[in-house]
Amino acid sequence: MQPVLELIDVSKRYGGVRALERARFACAAGRVHAVLGENGAGKSTLIKIMAGVVQPDEGRIVLQGQERRFAHPQDAVGAGIACIFQELSLMPDLSVADNICITNPPQRFGFIDARAQRRIAEAALARAGAEDIHPLAPVGSLSLSRRQMVEIAKALAREPKILILDEATSALTEADVRRVFALLKRLRDEGMAIVYISHRMHEIAELADDCSVFRNGRHVATFLAGAKTDTETVELMIGREVRHAYPAKPASLGAADGSAQKVDSGRPPALAVEGLSWGGRLHDISLSVRSGEIVGLGGLDGQGQREFFFALFGVLRGVSGRISVDGKPVVSHSPRAAKRPAVGIALVPEDRKTDGLMLPMSVRDNLCLAALDRLSRFGVIRSAAEASATAQVMKQLAIKCPDAGDAVGTLSGGNQQKVVIAKWLLNAPRIILLNDPTRGIDVGTKQEIYLLLRQLAEAGAAVLLYSTDYAELIGCCDRVGVFFDGRVVRWLQGDEMTEHALVASALNMVPGS
């Protein structure tokens, strides 16, 4: 089958870092082609070259039989290539319609035609299966999942011949994922070439016609979807045998109802929450987490898990209820108060790009940002202490970067996520809140993070983990509290923790009914 887009012996380096080395890739019309590999394998650089965001140092791009070179993203758009990056490109202060039409707004008498722009946005949203999003709503008012749907609609409004999606479902609710899957299958049947990047193997199994694996900047293999098992595919991605996805769990630490029972010698739980409520979004939440325990938070996205973390971390105002740390009541008026040694709470947010990192700043600065009080004296940072702490935590989490002085934005997604987690480890937190920490990162890095979480728990930390991945909750957590409409509606533990039970509880159904 004649490829519609082909990259031949493409290479790209950033300083001394090899992002791609004589890489090859080809996709055909009417096919979904999955690109697989760990973070840092070269996938993002590959699609940025396709989209005209970066130019290759060597190699050729052939589009519909003709050699092309895209000096600017608009050149690729004009050639019929649309890319949906993992990092959203939306302007939060503009409306949905403004964002969808931002590169080529309809005009009338030299001014933007607002009515025509709204019609274009409505059509694009409908095509994406997101008719419920109002075209005049400010993007900043939407949840991360709905913003991702706007990003997809924005790409479709350009009427592309080739659509590239980079972890496009990682921030979506299950309902939106189903809509996107139906859309992609329809676009494939209409003859569009689709390049799809995902670390979720079940998505690849459902959508892909062809698969290409990259490792360390090189093309490793291309094969028909289904020709290799998941295990064989992952081994191609990481270059080693896959042994264990999740570290072993210790013996059960307590009751499945989330009650604040004591573990040993009358010691209170590390974190106890009683009757926590906030602004009509959180309702009478009570739970406890003990030192050495990983407690999961399940439920559909947007059921209050994010707000619950913000309440514990002192971001929200007007929170009622009682929060205790090691049996002592605390009042977290601000994140600064929550992270002080007497409380010791750390929060890893869901969106590392906007909430977790300062992308233009160096890896070193990002790592030390949350621990400046510990690393400074009389308001001046102690350089030796900063260098020692940075080297220690980079080694502990195996953060891969040429130099700690490099901008954190130049790292792969998995290494960026490690930096978000590592910066809190310098504070030696006792309570760690993680909001979907493995979203959009590769299989190998996920396993490293799973092992790290268990090691932190074994060292005495209390861990609260929210994840949209049910298998992750089952594999990592000692017990799981399922959120629905701002409440914890059910606790699951041991053999009760099944995907069926999690889904049923997330819908506020009795499992088995």
Image (spheres, rainbow, N blue to C red):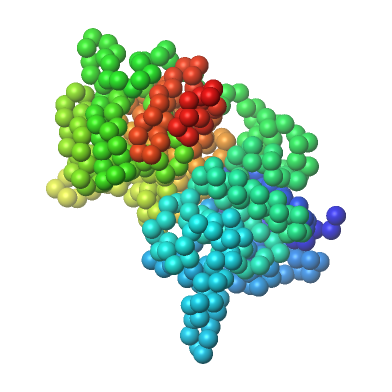
Q: As drawn, which residue projects farthest toward the right?
A: 1
Where, quadrant-wise, is the N terminus in this rendering? Answer: bottom right
Foreground residue among 478 and 438 = 478
Q: Residue at x 57, y 51 (%)?
A: 168
Residue 176 lies, in percent from the top left, at 55, 48
Residue 28 lies, in percent from the top left, at 78, 56
| Whether residue 460 can be seen here | no
Q: Which residue is drawn at 20% across and 38% down?
A: 320
Foreground residue among 183 and 337 = 183
Q: Which residue is drawn at 61% across and 54% down?
A: 165
Residue 307 lies, in percent from the top left, at 33, 43
Q: Residue at x 50, y 81 (%)?
A: 113
> How many numbered discs sit on the rendered protein?
0
Q: In the drawing, does residue 107 fall left or right of residue 291?
A: right
| Whether residue 483 can be seen here | yes
Q: As drawn, which residue projects farthest toward the top?
A: 265
Residue 414 lies, in percent from the top left, at 50, 43
Foreground residue among 341 and 198 = 198
Locate residue 443: give its quadrant: top right
